[in-house]
Amino acid sequence: MSEHGSDSMRYLESIEGIEPSHLEGFFQGWRCKPTPQQFLAILGGSSRVVLAWDASSARVVGFINALSDGRLMAFIPLLEVLPAFRGRGIGSALVRRMLTRLNEHYAVDVVCDADVVSFYKRHDLRSGHSMMRRNYEWPQPLANLCEDGTQE
């Protein structure tokens, strides 16, 4: 496992040794969110991950993942830092580390909400146009993602 960081905060580039119990509290504000077990599977299916590990609480407090074809294109679908750890530069550290790992790609795309565009611009990403589809009304994915197994 590749590891970098300060005494308390470590940045890991692998899910080796990570257990579902280390991944609780993420997906703040989502109608239906993955269980910690599903979240671990999402990270495991990613091309690259960077995790912020807080040694004092023995848990993951932030993460970023990327999906990639390995050469031309990469997409960063998820970045989150737990609320109690925000404002400490962890999100920026995660983005910097991921962009460094994806430097060999021609394009790295992020689709984000308007309120975080300035955050990504500080990391040399440019605004562009994007199209997306969200299956909010499609029951199968929601049933698979809701922690309690219900559909919302």
Image: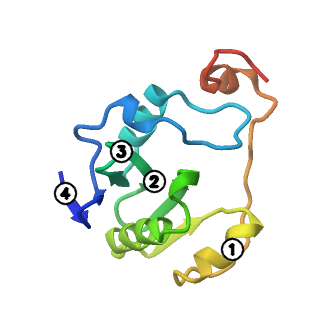
Question: Residue flagged by tag 3: what amino acid is it?
Answer: Ser
Task: In the rendered view, tell whether residue 66 sits above or below residue 25.
Answer: below
Look at 75% across and 22% down and name the residue there: 139
Locate residue 86 relative to residue 127 in the image: left or right: left
Give the mark toward the camera: 3 or 1. 3
Earlier sequence position, callout 3 versus callout 1: 3
Label 2 sits on residue: 62
Quarter occupied by residue 15: top left
Label 4 sits on residue: 2
Does residue 72 show up?
A: yes
Q: Are marks 2 and 1 in contact (CB under 8 Å)?
A: no
Q: Secondary structure at mark 4?
A: loop
Q: Which colour scheme appears in the figure?
A: rainbow
Quarter occupied by residue 13: bottom left
Locate residue 52 relative to residue 113 in the image: left or right: left
Question: Residue flagged by tag 2: what amino acid is it?
Answer: Gly
Locate residue 97 relative to residue 74 in the image: left or right: left
Q: Secondary structure at mark 2?
A: strand
Earlier sequence position, callout 2 versus callout 4: 4
Q: Residues within 10 Å of mark 1 (few under 14, many from 20)?
A: some
Quarter of the figure that contains the C terminus: top right
Q: Are marks 1 and 4 in contact (CB under 8 Å)?
A: no
Give the mark toward the camera: 3 or 2. 3
Question: Residue flagged by tag 1: what amino acid is it?
Answer: Val
Look at 34% across and 52% down and name the residue there: 54
Mark 1 → mark 4, Cα distance in angstroms: 29 Å
Q: Position of residue 70 (x, y in %)?
A: 34, 60
Does residue 49 show up?
A: no
Label 1 sits on residue: 117
Label 3 sits on residue: 57
